[in-house]
Image: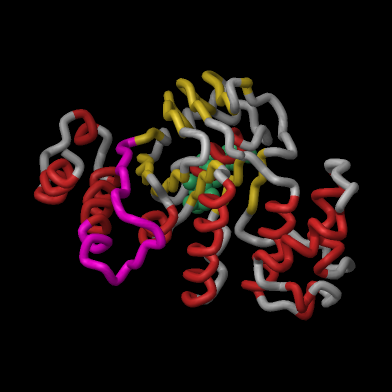
Amino acid sequence: MGAPIQIEQLSHRFHTRDPWVLEALSLEIASGESVAIIGESGCGKSTLLHMLAGLTLPSAGQVRIGGRTVQRPDAAWNMMFQRPGLYPWLNVRQNVALGLQFTGQTDSLKTRVAEMLALVDLADKAEAPIGDLSGGQQQRVALARSLAVGPEIILLDEPFSALDAFTRRNLQLEVSQIARDQGITLVLVTHDIDEALTMGDRVVVMGRAPGTFRSVLPVDLPYPRNPMQPAFGRQREALMARFRDSVAPQTTRDQPAPTPDHAQLELAHG
Ligand SMILES: Nc1ncnc2c1ncn2[C@@H]1O[C@H](COP(=O)(O)OP(=O)(O)OP(=O)(O)O)[C@@H](O)[C@H]1O
Ligand SMILES: [Mg+2]
């Protein structure tokens, strides 16, 4: 099962004399919810994700997961990066087993690994060396390794950006489905607007210098989502408009000019 995440007045700079990288971020993410984060390069998305994972501590404010302040990484909060981070000297099965071994969940290790490999459709590759797999297959091994430990939270930092369009789309749908089936809370950083709309219950748009949450768009579309559908296209327009606003100077944030897209969106969401 998932856990709720509370981001409370989170601010960060890497050195005391540096400008703030993140400023006063606040957001509540429900248990089992899926939130996508988009924003210009350098706005602080990865920094934020590292804080959710307990890999970086904030200069001010806090992150709470399941009510507890995050102070260090936890095996129940799983982070997947752009590259799958597998061990090439181990085969597929051994890579998937690693998370279970690290967390001491070795009781039914063999069965669990087999289940996970079946889940990501790699049962026939169990004994294959990592180097023999395609990029998409390697991402699926990383995914199986993450899921094996029964995580409460999965944090994804542009995990599919190196993949071809078809593989990417399949994995977006698969990961989204698995997270919903298992009630896992998902936070996804991406540059891809369709990916955000395919996987997010809500999409957060960040502004930069300093990084702030500029707007939050609820995505009111049934799963599995299809970018070819007109309703998806309307959400894409709305999100693009918000993204354009986020790139505009900060002053426009305080008093955003209503655009037709916003008007449409507000209508759509009452
Ligand atoms: N360890 C660090 N020390 C100092 N500055 C850092 C460090 N890591 C990141 N930064 C700075 O913080 C800002 C945000 O970086 P971050 O990697 O979080 O951006 P991002 O939104 O993930 O960008 P991208 O979309 O390109 O991945 C950038 O200006 C970056 O230079
Ligand atoms: Mg980044």
Q: In this view, does 148 lie to the left or right of 236?
A: right
Residue 265 lies, in percent from the top left, at 18, 46
For residue 16, say whether it is visible: no
**Is residue 226 part of the magenta span, yes or no?**
yes
Q: In this view, does 60 lie above or below 233?
A: above
Q: Which of 8 and 29 is in front in this view?
A: 29
Q: In this view, does 39 lie to the left or right of 46?
A: left
Q: Where is residue 23 in the image (x, y as percent from the top left)?
A: 43, 27
**Residue 190 seen from this side:** yes
Identified at 31% across, 43% down, the residue is 218
Residue occupying the point 70% across, 68% down: 118
Q: Which of 63 and 149 is in front in this view?
A: 149
Q: In this view, does 71 lie to the left or right of 11?
A: right
Q: Does the magenta stretch include residue 267?
A: no
Whereabouts is ligand 1, in terms of quadrant? top right
Name the quadrant of the N terminus.
top right
Task: State the extent of the magenta-drawn residues as a range.
Answer: 214-234
Q: In this view, does 211 lie above or below 191?
A: above
Q: Quadrant of residue 70?
A: top right
Say which quarter of the image contains residue 232: bottom left
Quadrant where the C terminus sits is top left
Total marks drawn? 0
Q: Where's residue 207, x and y in %?
A: 36, 40
